[in-house]
Amino acid sequence: MRLTLHTDYALRVLIHLGVHTSRRVSIREIAQAYRISENHLVKVVHRLGQGGFVTTVRGRGGGLELARPASEINVGAVVRFTEDDMTLVDCEGRNSTDGRPCVLSPACVLRGVLGDALGAFLAVLDRYTLADLLTGREAALLGLSVPEN
């Protein structure tokens, strides 16, 4: 299982906001901290806003903040929301050149095994909240003090 760059950036945005709970943060600040594209972050932040993970405030004094406490933001929920397709194999042929399903589909056991693996992966992520990811080490790596409260 490999997460998309979109999900990677979404988690970074949430971690950054979790480190800065006492103030609003700009997209530019996050982009500079992680050395990633502001344009891409705009799309990521928009999606996180749609999911109710972040709140955006426009204008003077505006910026981003967590929509709810870090302890209420489940990592598994973020991953499910930001990943467009978590299918591990294309048994139905949606992405094949001829559009036909795999010839093994009617008797394949692999699909169930991979489904179980994906379920286990998500179950582990479901055990963690954003608060669990905020150890203070990420703040130190970004040259910041420990998480603000």
Image (tube, helix red, strand yellow):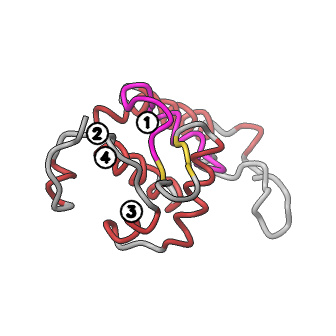
Which mark identifies residue 20? 4
Q: Are marks 3 and 1 in contact (CB under 8 Å)?
A: no
User: How many marks overall?
Assistant: 4
Residue 7, image x and y in percent? Answer: 50, 53
Disc number lying in front (4 or 1): 4
Which amino acid type corresponds to the residue marked 3 in the rendered image? Ile
Instruction: Calculate the distance from the C-alpha at mark 4 to the C-alpha at mark 3.
Output: 11 Å
Q: Please state, as top left, top right, bottom left or bottom right, where the C terminus lies in the image.
A: top left
- Residue 16 within the magenta-colored segment of the rendering: no
Residue matched to label 3: 30
Q: Are marks 3 and 2 in contact (CB under 8 Å)?
A: no
Say whether disc 3 or disc 2 marks the residue closer to the N-terminus: 3
Label 1 Cα neighbours within 10 Å, binned few <14 / some 14-19 / many ≥20: many
Secondary element under disc 1, as helix, strand or loop, is helix
Disc number lying in front (3 or 1): 3
Left or right of 143? Residue 81 is right
Which residues make up the magenta segment?
65-86
Disc number lying in front (2 or 4): 4
Q: Residue at x 60, y 41 (%)?
A: 81
Q: Residue at x 50, y 35 (%)?
A: 67
For this rendering, which residue is in front, 4 or 117?
A: 4
Which amino acid type corresponds to the residue marked 2 in the rendered image? Leu
Q: Is residue 123 above or below residue 93?
A: above
Q: Are marks 2 and 1 in contact (CB under 8 Å)?
A: yes
Say whether disc 3 or disc 1 marks the residue closer to the N-terminus: 3
Disc number lying in front (4 or 3): 4
Secondary element under disc 3, as helix, strand or loop, is helix
Residue matched to label 1: 75
Instruction: Calculate the distance from the C-alpha at mark 2 to the C-alpha at mark 1.
Output: 9 Å
Say whether disc 4 or disc 3 marks the residue closer to the N-terminus: 4
